[in-house]
Amino acid sequence: MSDMNAILAPGMLVRHPDFPDWGIGQVQSNIAGRITVNFREQGKVVIDGSRIELVPVFDA
């Protein structure tokens, strides 16, 4: 898996590829591959960036 998550910075908007019903999330932090995202419908989630590649949202 490519490390597209490395470009994610606090404030960026993302979607989880496996859980589209979570809605758009805002990156809170990205430290050593652990990405904390606050999703509209799921709340705060910590994601292992080595296992899940989040999808950046630019048109929200």
Image (cartoon, rainbow, N blue to C red):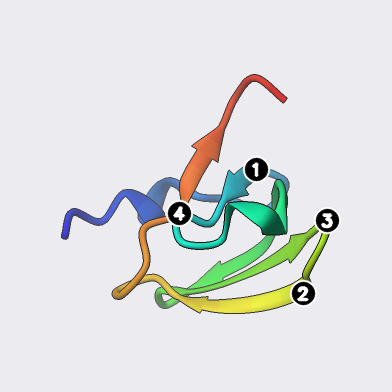
Secondary structure beneath dot 2 equals strand
Measure the alpha-carbon separation of dots 4 and 1.
16 Å
Camera-side mark, 4 or 1: 4
| Residue shown at 37% from the left, 55% from the top | 6
Residue 42: name its quadrant.
Answer: bottom right
The residue furthest left is: 1
Taking 29 as reference, is 27 above or below it?
above
Q: Which residue is mark 1?
A: 12
Q: Which residue is mark 2?
A: 44
Measure the alpha-carbon separation of dots 4 and 2.
16 Å
Secondary structure beneath dot 3 equals loop
Taking 41 as reference, is 48 above or below it?
below
The residue furthest top is: 59
**Relative to residue 8, is residue 58 drawn left or right?**
right
Choose the circle earlier in sequence order: 4 or 1: 1
Measure the alpha-carbon separation of dots 4 and 3.
15 Å
Q: Position of residue 30 (x, y in %)?
A: 54, 66
Q: Amino acid at mark 4?
A: Pro
Q: Residues within 10 Å of mark 3 (few under 14, many from 20)?
A: few
Q: Position of residue 37 (x, y in %)?
A: 67, 65
Q: Which residue is mark 3?
A: 40
Tag 2 and tag 3, C-beta contact below 8 Å:
no
Tag 1 and tag 2, C-beta contact below 8 Å:
no
Q: Amino acid at mark 3?
A: Arg
Q: Amino acid at mark 2?
A: Lys
Q: Amino acid at mark 1?
A: Met
Q: Position of residue 10 (x, y in %)?
A: 67, 53
Choose the circle earlier in sequence order: 4 or 3: 4
Q: Which residue is mark 4?
A: 17
Q: Residues within 10 Å of mark 4 (few under 14, many from 20)?
A: few
Choose the circle earlier in sequence order: 3 or 1: 1
Q: Quadrant of the C terminus?
A: top right
